[in-house]
Image: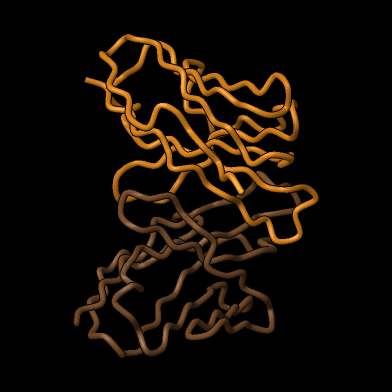
Amino acid sequence: GAGVSQSPRYKVAKRGQDVALRCDPISGHVSLFWYQQALGQGPEFLTYFQNEAQLDKSGLPSDRFFAERPEGSVSTLKIQRTQQEDSAVYLCASSSFPANTYEQYFGPGTRLTVT
Amino acid sequence: RKEVEQDPGPFNVPEGATVAFNCTYSNSASQSFFWYRQDCRKEPKLLMSVYSSGNEDGRFTAQLNRASQYISLLIRDSKLSDSATYLCVVNKGSSASKIIFGSGTRLSIRP
């Protein structure tokens, strides 16, 4: 079956531009997560949705970051006025709920480079 | 101190060798533990969950030591295809969102 997909796979933005990153989770998966992964580091939690409800956004680094999942399926992570420190791979993951094992299925990520 | 710490490596071992690495966690309330594997420029994929009694999946064995707050991963008879970064993952509570990834241990298997 289809896995988690993300688009675009690569994005180059000039500092100050706004970007929107899309995630299509596995069909029927209730939980959706966004992570930021810097080079040589593990993924760092950004935010979590259960259906359309954003239950945890404690990992969003600043108010320039905004995520939504209006219909409980596709999610968009928006970064306003991008800065160089925003350069990273943004990973989306989905999971079935209730999750006995908390196994998450990751998408291929969007590599964002801010110049 | 980081909540989840791993030796970054790289571990460079010959094919067929046995290799083990640990991961320590700081929060004694942590409830669930996992090992994920991440190939270069790819997404992480679940390798195995770590149960209190330990668990084995083929050449891979995972152990949990709650008293010392670490988990381990042992790979026997290593293959070239085992070369990857191994991420330790700890869930801090009942909320699905309280998941912390370690920075990963890089493993390289040489012929």
Which quadrant: the C terminus of chain A? Answer: top left
User: Is residue B34 shown above or below A47?
Assistant: below
Q: Name the residue: 35% across, 65% down.
A: B105
- Chain B colour is brown
Percent across and percent down for residue A4 are 55, 41
Left or right of B67 on screen, residue B76: left
Q: Name the residue: 49% across, 81% down.
A: B60
Residue nearest the observer in this picture, B95 or A2: A2
- Chain A colour is orange
Left or right of B45 on screen, residue B107: left
Q: Quadrant of residue B26?
A: bottom right
Percent across and percent down for residue B99 are 60, 50
User: Is residue A109 shown above or below A75?
Assistant: below
Percent across and percent down for residue B72 are 49, 77
**In the displayed image of the protein, which residue is found farthest to the right?**
A98
Q: Name the residue: 43% across, 49% down.
A: B43
